Image (spheres, rainbow, N blue to C red):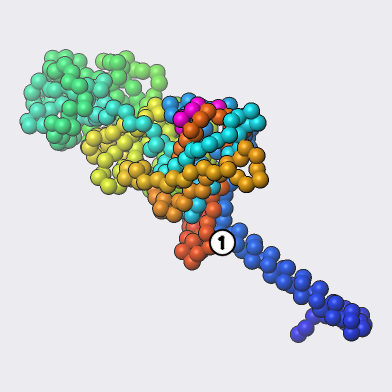
Amino acid sequence: MKFDFTHEAILDKKDRKTYHLLQTIVYFGAFLGTLYFSYLILFPSRTFEFDFTNPNSSANSIISPRNELGIPLSNGKIAENKNLYFDTALVGNFSQAVISFTLSRNSAAAESGAAEVRRSYQAFFYPEGEPVGFKDGTLIKNNGNYYLISVGQLRKFENINAVSAFGFPPGAFVAADTEEMSYNPPGREIKSTENYPDGSLFKINDDYHILADQKLKKFISAAVFLTQYSSGQTINKSADFLAKYELAGDPVGFSDGSLISYGDGVYIISGKNFFPIDNPVTFEALGYDWNSVIPASADELSLYQRGKLTNIKGVHPDGTIFSVAEDNRYYIIQDGLKHLLPSSNIAVSWGKNNPIIVSKKELEISSRCAIRKKILAAQTYVCELPIENLANFFGKDYEFKQNFSQAGEIDSLEVTFKNTVSVANLKATLRDMINRIIIRYVPQASIQ
């Protein structure tokens, strides 16, 4: 069937030719428009910006411009032969990243310079701090000797009789080698005639407690206790035991880095805060595992204050544990540093979540380019970075390092991620689209 809404109009031969010509042009334009919008969907690009003349603008999407010491560079001033660092966060793989920056009018022209990019998680880009030993409360044994980690120190029991006298369960002591034990400084020997040492764990009726500063601190629930320790580590006591030690006023909450669900939301616990995650895409982009999410009650959540919403630009908070894919090493995030957890025994003592998988080898892989003057644009320079070699790396974050051969002042900075037209990129885009649909609607039901 042919639709003709102008069948009553009668055109002469010349006008009919003109009409058909215009009709063809319209159809062809519609076809080109469809191709163009299909290209935008199937081969997407993403642009991130930072305006140094308005550094507090909510429109700034580039993360944390800073110098080599990590000090923010909100004014855009770069010293001679120094580096500007900044990050972007996005989901998916791209073929090219184009950096474009415009210098201020009073700034000298950029004679030379280079840019470099690598991919991982922002927190795993942190400098490495001192290794961390076992967590307080851990029970370990070595060569017939028994130890408790108390206030960070490795405290040896006088003998096996002392272990029995205190009531510590012998099966709870984890076998550790001498190297593992070396990361906790030695402390005073534990004698059976003393009070219980700090770090001792108790189960009194159905409640769990830890001794800290010679006060009993109660875990707000059994579920909370199990995010930090196992039930087999506790000493069973009757209610009469509560009269022997002062009770601390503040209860103990979840282990830092724990993932909890409450209502329709999923949250990260760190310090005294819970950080809501904005959507499932962000959850998976951060490398989290849905199997690590623990349902929480209102009482458990009430211990914390609501922190900043975690979106795709978010950084893993303190308490996050990373596992290195190449050698099964572990790191924990604390105070802006990543600290080596030298063994799986030590890592397990700090958290029961499935750790986030990263690659240390991938940190050594990068892409570089030299800057060049942009044609017909005053004081604007570009640098085109091929980033196909970073495809399928662990992490959502790209860390850029921009070097300047002489001092300058940047007015604006822009990074555009692009995809070249290829069958491989088309398949990758379709795969990402399907995965986003799945994670938006499947995981949320599984954690209720």
Name the side, left or right, on which 395 lies relative to 151: right
Say which of 301 and 242 sits in front. 301
Residue at position x 20%, y 21% from top? 185
Q: Is residue 90 above or below residue 314?
A: below
- Magenta segment includes 82: yes
Q: Where is residue 123 in the image (x, y as percent from the top left)?
A: 41, 36
Name the side, left or right, on which 301 lies relative to 328: right
Q: Quadrant of residue 110?
A: top right
Q: Where is residue 311 in the image (x, y as percent from the top left)?
A: 53, 41
Residue at position x 57%, y 53% from top? 45
Residue at position x 19%, y 23% from top? 154
Residue at position x 72%, y 71% from top? 28
Name the side, left or right, on which 64 lies relative to 224: right
Pick the quarter of the image with the N terminus.
Answer: bottom right
Type of the residue with mark 1: Leu
Instruction: Look at mark 1 in the image and give the residue it sits on.
Output: 42
Q: What stretch is highlighted in magenta?
A: 77-85
